[in-house]
């Protein structure tokens, strides 16, 4: 029965509040598992998993840890917890994980949550989860729920009790829901998409029979592709439709949608069959800040369109197309599972279609010519006359997917 909720807390500073959370978990009908990440003292406080046990997995004794200063001890415990928590989960010691605290407690707990598999209920409640602070430190590319505690988690009062109550019951509710989710035997397809390729991607997915395929789209904006790669590594998908490779452009040339380095590698490593289309690979984007800064010096030389007041899409140059073709070919050539590359000759994003502001057949032709010359013969290439969003491309991609699925 999945009812064990791990409470990650520094019992040397949050003992009273954690004990309240422990009792609330019990009131939910669940079993609390206390993971103590205290860095100030080794005093026994009734934890199920002690700081000493966490450090031992990291290969460090308390005697080595104790003399460290505050910053070093927090950083070391963070790394130790990051290594230990997945081991504790594999040992079956908890089913969900919660952290309720301030900045350092949340930082350490979130680092550990981000290395747990998708689907495990994970909640970070922190007094610092507000303002202009980035969510990357708490969420990364995992399904971590972040709650602002409103008041500091220091002493029990109406506000802190309410937050603790809500967090504990939320974790219990997620565990209850997990028991009710039915198994799905359809083939699982992962797809990538941006607004400028959505017509083509959505049209393709609609052509796949719903009774045979479960379809999941990821927004290829520097985070979505990274999330997809991680889920592929966790074995969640049978097929990959990587129809929007813009994050590779970001990785190689920069721009707004950076943050997902190494795209395509997960499917290659896990030997998952792929249909690949260089969607939005032909586009470099820039973020414009409140002062109007962010555009490159050569912006007037680039074919472009403004997605909105903050983002400008620009067509890549011919030499950039050749560079990206070489990167894509190098990655695809490592694949051992079947790969089909679909190459539309009329642009790989909406604005690059014929008549559009970023239409440039010379750049498109250079990309196609280069990648064809570099691909190993085992990779099937399908040429399409038209834009990535055209129905002819949707049909070609669908046929390629169905062939790989058969």
Image: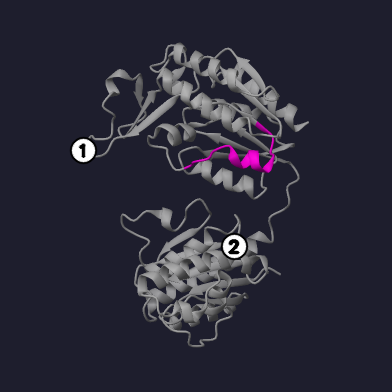
**Image check: 162 left or right of 203?**
left
Mark 1 lies on a secondary structure that is loop
Q: How crowded is mark 2: few (under 14 residues within 10 Å), some or many (20 or more)?
A: some
Check residue 235 for magenta coloring. Answer: no
Q: In which quarter of the image is residue 106?
A: bottom left
Q: Are marks 2 and 1 in contact (CB under 8 Å)?
A: no
What residue span does the magenta drawing correspond to? Answer: 260-274
Of 6 and 272, which appears nearest the observer? 272
Residue at the spot 38% in from the left edge and 61% down from the top edge? 129
Of 217 and 376, which appears nearest the observer? 376
Q: From what the image shows, is residue 117 above or below residue 208?
A: below
Q: How many labels does the image show?
A: 2
Quarter holding the C terminus?
top right
Q: Quadrant of residue 181?
A: bottom right
How far separated are the C-alphas under marks 2 and 1?
43 Å
**Quick one: label 2 or label 1, which is nearer the N terminus?**
2
Mark 2 lies on a secondary structure that is helix
Of 353 and 207, which appears nearest the observer? 353
- The circle on residue 174 is 2
**Image check: 304 left or right of 111?**
left
Residue at the spot 38% in from the left edge and 37% down from the top edge? 256
**Image check: 67 left or right of 388?**
left
Furthest-right residue in this view: 406
Q: In which quarter of the image is residue 178?
A: bottom right
What residue is pinned by disc 1? 291
Q: From what the image shows, is residue 76 above or below residue 328?
A: below
Q: Can residue 215 be seen in this view?
A: no
Whole-percent x and y of residue 368? 54, 17
Furthest-bottom residue in this view: 44
Q: Can residue 325 be seen in this view?
A: yes
């Amino acid at each position: 029965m999945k009812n064990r909720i791990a409470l990650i807390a520094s019992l040397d500073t949050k003992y009273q509040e954690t004990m309240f959370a422990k009792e609330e978990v019990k009131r939910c009908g669940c079993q609390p598992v206390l993971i103590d990440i205290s860095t100030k003292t080794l005093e026994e406080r009734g934890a199920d998993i002690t700081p000493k046990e966490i450090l031992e997995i990291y290969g460090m004794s308390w005697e080595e840890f104790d003399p460290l200063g505050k910053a070093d001890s927090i950083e070391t415990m963070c790394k130790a917890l990051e290594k230990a928590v997945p081991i504790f989960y594999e040992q079956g010691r908890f089913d969900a994980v919660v952290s309720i605290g301030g900045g350092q407690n949340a930082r350490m707990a979130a680092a550990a949550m981000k290395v747990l598999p998708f689907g495990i209920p994970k909640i970070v409640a922190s007094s610092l989860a507000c303002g202009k602070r980035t969510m990357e430190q708490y969420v990364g590319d995992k399904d971590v729920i972040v709650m602002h505690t409103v008041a500091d988690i220091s002493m029990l009062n109406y506000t802190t009790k309410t937050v603790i109550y809500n967090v504990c019951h939320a974790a219990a509710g997620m565990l209850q829901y997990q028991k009710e989710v039915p198994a799905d035997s359809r083939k699982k397809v992962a797809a990538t998409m941006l607004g400028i390729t959505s017509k083509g991607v959505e049209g393709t997915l609609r052509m796949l029979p719903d009774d045979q395929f479960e379809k999941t789209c990821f927004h290829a904006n520097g985070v979505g592709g990274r999330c997809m790669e991680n889920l592929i590594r966790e074995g969640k998908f049978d097929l990959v439709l990587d129809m929007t490779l813009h994050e590779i452009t970001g990785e190689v040339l920069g721009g707004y949608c950076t943050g997902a380095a190494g795209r395509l590698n997960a499917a290659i490593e896990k030997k998952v069959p792929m249909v690949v289309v260089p969607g939005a690979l032909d586009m470099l984007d820039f973020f414009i800040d409140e002062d109007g800064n962010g555009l490159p010096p050569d912006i007037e030389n680039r074919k472009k369109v403004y997605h909105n007041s903050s983002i400008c899409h620009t067509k890549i140059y011919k030499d950039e197309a050749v560079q990206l073709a070489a990167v894509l070919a190098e990655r695809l050539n490592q694949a051992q599972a079947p790969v089909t590359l679909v190459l539309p000759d009329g642009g790989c994003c909406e604005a690059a279609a014929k008549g559009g502001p970023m239409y440039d057949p010379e750049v498109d032709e250079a990309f196609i010519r280069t990648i064809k010359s570099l691909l190993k013969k085992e990779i099937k290439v399908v040429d399409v006359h038209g834009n990535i969003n055209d129905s002819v491309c949707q049909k070609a991609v669908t046929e390629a997917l169905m062939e790989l699925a058969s």
